[in-house]
């Protein structure tokens, strides 16, 4: 049997967290899910908290820092926002994770990461909206509204895909969302 990589464990932890919350990130159930012994876990991590912390750090890096890096150089702010929203909604590195993290915002491991990610994302959005010509306070408000819409979209996709199938895989609905979030009418 091949030894699992650290990334295998991180991915399994994020999937478990998305499906069942922080308490679902437990060594024995994850080892069973991965078809390995606990020894494989201890090869990469000292304890469950280290796994959770590393998994959330990976999510922060891949779901925020790397995405912002991908779009930051786009000169046109509207195109930058369009690309950002498309990536965020269609290339989620851990589908359904954000609603689970928000639900566990008081967890001592989750809280600082969720705070950093939210701050960084809203700040980046506010910068882009300011580049579109909004005054700083209005740009910040627009960023908060846009981020709220994104988090809500992700939550609905996770919680009610059968009721709202357009949030799952409807290119027209996605285009409408992106157009709405990049339009400054009103």
Image (tube, grey):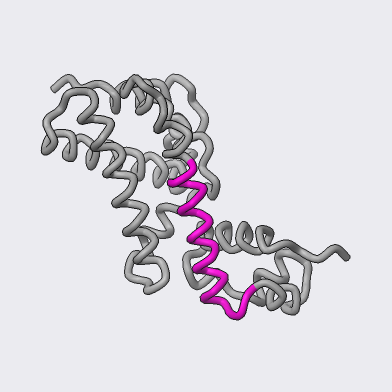
Q: How many labels does the image show?
A: 0
Secondary structure, magenta segment, majority class? helix
- Foreground pick, 130 / 177: 130
**Residue 22 visible in rendering:** yes
In percent of width and height, residue 14 lies at: 55, 59
Compared across the picture, whether 165 is left or right of 42 comes to left
Residue positioned 13% across, 36% down in the render: 136
Q: Quadrant of the C terminus?
A: top left
In percent of width and height, residue 121 lies at: 33, 45
Residue positioned 41% across, 21% down in the render: 175
Q: In which quarter of the image is the N terminus?
A: bottom right
Q: Is residue 54 magenta?
A: yes
Compared across the picture, whether 41 is left or right of 151 comes to right
Residue positioned 31% across, 24% down in the render: 77
Q: Quadrant of residue 74?
A: top left
Asked if residue 2 is positioned above or below residue 74 in the image, the reply reads below
Compared across the picture, whether 185 is left or right of 175 comes to left
Magenta stretch?
45-66
Residue positioned 17% across, 23% down in the render: 133
Asked if residue 130 is positioned above or below residue 6 in the image, the reply reads above
**Residue 85 visible in rendering:** no
- Foreground pick, 78 / 182: 78
């Amino acid at each position: 049997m091949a030894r699992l990589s650290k990334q295998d464990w991180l991915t399994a932890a994020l999937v478990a967290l998305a499906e069942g919350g922080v308490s679902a990130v437990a060594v024995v159930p994850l080892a069973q899910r991965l078809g390995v012994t606990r020894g494989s876990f201890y090869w990469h991590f000292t304890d469950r908290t280290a796994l959770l912390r590393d998994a959330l750090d990976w999510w922060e890096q891949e779901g925020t820092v790397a995405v912002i890096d991908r779009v930051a150089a786009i000169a046109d702010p509207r195109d930058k926002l369009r690309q950002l929203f498309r990536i965020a909604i269609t290339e989620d590195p851990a589908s359904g994770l954000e609603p689970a993290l928000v639900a566990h915002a008081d967890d001592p491991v989750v809280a600082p990461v969720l705070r950093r990610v939210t701050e960084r994302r809203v700040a980046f959005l506010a910068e882009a909206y300011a580049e579109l010509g909004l005054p700083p306070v209005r740009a910040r408000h627009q960023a908060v509204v846009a981020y709220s819409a994104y988090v809500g979209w992700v939550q609905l996709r996770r919680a009610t895909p059968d009721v709202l199938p357009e949030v799952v895989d409807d290119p027209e609905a996605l285009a409408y969302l992106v157009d709405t979030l990049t339009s400054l009418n009103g």
